[in-house]
Amino acid sequence: MPSDAEVGTTGAGPLLEVTGLEVSYGDVPVLHGVDLTVGTGERVAVVGESGSGKSTTAAAVLALLPGRGRVTAGSIRFAGEDVTHAPESRLRRLRGREVGLVPQDPMSNLNPATRVGAQVAETLVAHGLAKGRAARDRAIELLVEAGIEQPERRYRQFPHEFSGGMRQRVLIAMALACEPALLIADEPTSALDVTVQRRILDHLETLRASRGASLLMVTHDLGLAADRADRIVVMSKGHVVETGPAEAILRDPQHEYTRRLVAAAPSVNASKVVAAGGVSVTERSAGPDASARPLLEVDDLVRTYRVRGRREPLVAVDHVSFSLQAGTTTAVVGESGSGKTTVARMVLGLEEPTSGEVRLDGEVVRTARGAARRAVRRAMQPVFQDPYASLDPTFTVERIVDEPLRVFGVGDKRSRRARVTDLLEQVALPASVGQRFPGELSGGQRQRVAIARALALDPRLMVCDEAVSALDVLVQDQVMTLLEDLQRDLGISFLFITHDLAVVRQLARDVVVMRNGRVVEHGTVDAVFASPAEDYTRDLLDAIPGAGFFS
């Protein structure tokens, strides 16, 4: 196999060459002798779990290390020039003009108080490429190139008026505005559903190829790396542990850590699931007698909203019906805006349906009052997508997990403390975590705390809204294994809201496919995935990155 220095370079040497890079935050070293190259026109993906150092490496290239971060050894060369400790005046020209950046979170990287078009135009003005009317006209052209319709109208809008996918397109437009030689994309589509992700990445690839630019992509998604990179660099604990052509790395990984990453990647293909457990998802999670009354019944749900300036109400959920048997998992999937989260909120009683009913063990959630209402609340508990946003950062973990017990008056202080210890043990966290705060935990640990809190009242149903979509592949695998163990040991049922069909393949027995507020397909996972009846379902399956590598 060729070495990292030999792959994807031109006769004049690589466009980007990182050699022996070491970075520390304060006195804590986080990168240890990182070597990485990107050749002219080459696409390189840096993969690894959270904390592996992949984003720190990308930030170091642009001298954008946060806080007390600093390069302590090694060199960064761009087009043959050493920019490791370049003065700020040189770095201003490098950033944007020569190296473009597509950051991870579009909402936090766009100014909410400034119109979108002005932010794109500002990039051109800052680098002296255009000003005034010329900058405005070029910004509109860039919005068109990024795939944004009605660009003149969109130019005048604010970021909150754009969907997540559209905001990401704006960041791509800004990154490519100065036609840089290198594009760095840090988790550019991690929070987007698979079809939006595919459209954005297809468009990004078209724009990149037309300009002959190189790409350095940071991602935890091995499927994405498989589909979109020529070469993969695998990082663990601040070290590069393996590098080589994408197909060779994913089909025949040499390092034990890389093998763990590949093994943990969820697969849309039944063959991997059957090989791992000997049975299909449907057989493994068949649960109790299917003829028994369902635990959850969603009957003809409708939810409409009045929108200012619109005569007809917006129909977010349109006559949705399905049921869930006790001890099983049903997944609700679809693109952003399909209505799946609105359905989850109505199931939890957080939102009133316009019409239709949700029944838990035969009890109508909307009309339950008094003791019946409290019983329903106890029996259903949510786990949300972003555990940092759903956990109070000023509370200790013990107080967070203890809160449902206090609200429902369960036990005394001593018994609740013992219960918290048991709950943390159930989600594979040590009791000492109880005295820490959410900000001191990793993403996977925070999600385990959220699950422990949901378990506190011994619920019969847990509603998980994109509960693993923001986690890296190893942590995602750990959390999904935990959910499977909880279902097997405690008989808990799960309603799993997700855009990730590979996760559905691993966790769910039944799947409900939604589009534009309607159910377009419903059945067992095995049946729907093996022989989808709708073109839309086939599109969702086809959009899953890396399916061919992880079969």
Image (cartoon, rainbow, N blue to C red):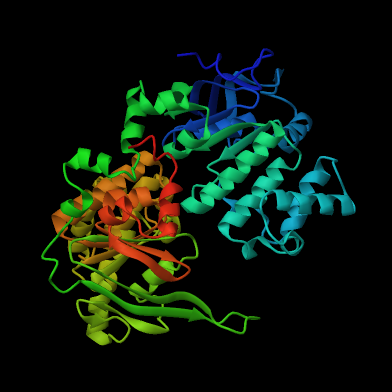
Residue 83 in sight from this viewpoint:
yes
Which quadrant is home to the C terminus? top left
Percent coordinates x, y for residue 398 in the rendering: 30, 56
Question: Could you tell whether 451 is left or right of 240 in the image?
Answer: left
Question: Could you tell whether 521 is left or right of 221 in the image?
Answer: left
Question: Could you tell whether 166 is left or right of 404 in the image?
Answer: right
> Vertically, is 241 above or below 197?
above
Q: Residue placed at 26% from the left, 75% from the top?
A: 297
Residue 237: quarter of image: top left
Q: How many marks?
A: 0
Percent coordinates x, y for residue 86 in the rendering: 72, 25
Residue 109 in sight from this viewpoint:
no
Q: Residue placed at 79% from the left, 32% from the top?
A: 89
> Vertically, is 57 above or below 523?
above
Q: Nearer the viewer, residue 183 or 108?
A: 183
Q: Residue placed at 43% from the left, 48% from the top?
A: 542
Percent coordinates x, y for residue 111 in the rendering: 68, 56
Question: Could you tell whether 259 is left or right of 102 in the image?
Answer: left
Which quadrant is home to the N terminus? top left
Residue 404: quarter of image: bottom left
Q: Nearer the viewer, residue 493 or 502?
A: 502
